[in-house]
Each structure stands twice: as structure tokens, then as C-alpha cells.
Amino acid sequence: SAVISQKPSRDICQRGTSLTIQCQVDSQVTMMFWYRQQPGQSLTLIATANQGSEATYESGFVIDKFPISRPNLTFSTLTVSNMSPEDSSIYLCSVDEGGAGGYTFGSGTRLTVV
Amino acid sequence: DAKTTQPPSMDCAEGRAANLPCNHSTISGNEYVYWYRQIHSQGPQYIIHGLKNNETNEMASLIITEDRKSSTLILPHATLRDTAVYYCIVSLYGTASKLTFGTGTRLQVTL
């Protein structure tokens, strides 16, 4: 299955600033997904990123707050903009390689906003 | 996507089988049942999936009822390393499908 490298693994940021999270996959994949996991909660899908087109955002998430880039088939970034303490969460990227292997997840970025 | 219902927590003794139930009464004919688990501080890990037949792999077995309204994930010999939150998800199969996570079952394996 694919190997995902997510950077940074954790960060502490000041409110009002922005953080860009990188997701690198060791194979080409069509779809990449970004999730948020708030403290003690389950995962919530933020958006789906397809190479060559704009990301598709889920209800409650907007591009101005969570801009996503997908420049090629192995890489994507998620930016958390104008951060507030409520943005403190784990952010995870995920890919589906197709076939029977299910979805593979990165190890996540633990973000704390102070 | 169909909604799933799982017990919030379960305990299991090490070495015994862990049977994790999931209800998905509104599942549609072309939706699969997926199971993932999330060990503390890690990303979710795919375990197994199925449509209507029972499935088995090196990690677990998946038993789906004939009417497909419920399923059970079986870890045949649970170990301490199986302590995690287990998510049952119903989704279409394919790269365009997205996974909607519920609250899952927190499985605690004890000595």
C-alpha cells in the first residue's frame, strides 16, 4: 500500500497566523482527502482534492479558510488560515489507491493554536 | 452514505476473540461495509471490507448478515496492540468515494 509522509507532525501556532500542511505520497493517486479530528472526536472530511481541478469542500468548510493545492498526482497541501484556538486539531490526509487495499492515512499533523 | 451505529466501548481479554458489532440498517445495495481502526496518536488503518459475503484476511474476519443490515468484525485472538477505536463505515466502492466516520467503538484489550 501507499506510504504517506505528512509534515509537520506537530506545530504550535499563534492565533491569526496560517499553517501549511504537506502530504507526500510515494505513488501516483487520483484522489486525496483531507480530514480534521478535533480533540476526543471522530474524523470529519474537509475536502477532496483531485489533481488539475479545484478541491471539493464538505459542508461547513470553505476554501478561504482551508485552501488546498494539488499540483501533481503525489502531493497536496492544506493551509489552515487565520487560525483561532478552535482550529486546534489533528489534520490528516488520505489516499485511495484503488483495488482492495482500502484508504491509506497519513500519521497526521497535530496543530495547537494559542 | 448510510449511517452506522456502534457501541461506544467494549472490553476484551487478551487471547480471546473480540466481536465488534455494527448496525447499518439503511445500507443500499451497492454500498460496502468497511472497517478501520485508529490506534492512539496514529492515522486510521484499513482492516477489511465486504459487500455481502463474509470476508477474512490476516487481520480479521467480517461477518455480514444476510439482510446486510448489520455486521460483526472479529479479531480472533486479541492482543494488547489491538486496543484502539474501531470504525464501521458504509460507503460506495471506488476512488471517488469518501469515507464518513462515525463515533466508533473503543476496544480495550486487557491482560
Image (spheres, coloured by chain):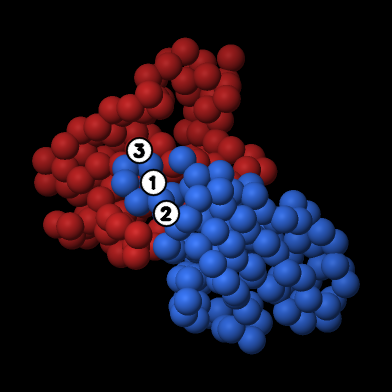
Chain colours: A blue, B red
CA gap, disc 3 to disc 2?
A: 14 Å
Q: Are marks 3 and 2 on the same chain?
A: no
Identify the image quadrant of residue B29.
bottom left
Amino acid on which disc 3 is placed: Ile
Front: mark 1 or 3:
1
CA gap, disc 1 to disc 3?
A: 8 Å
Please tell me whether mark 3 sits on a helix, a strand or a loop.
strand
Amino acid on which disc 2 is placed: Asp
Seen at 57% across and 83% down, the residue is: A62
Q: Dot 3, crowdedness within 10 Å: few (<14), some or many (≥20)?
A: many
Which residue, given by chain and number where applicable, does mark 1 sit on?
Answer: A102
Provide residue B26's location: percent of width, then percent of height: 22, 60
Which residue, given by chain and number where applicable, does mark 2 sit on?
Answer: A96
Please tell me whether mark 2 sits on a helix, a strand or a loop.
strand
**In the rendered structure, the residue with mark 1 lies on which chain?**
A
Which residue, given by chain and number where applicable, does mark 3 sit on?
Answer: B48
Provide residue A94's location: percent of width, then percent of height: 52, 56
Provide residue B16's location: percent of width, then percent of height: 43, 15
CA gap, disc 2 to disc 1?
A: 6 Å
Seen at 72% across and 56% down, the residue is: A7
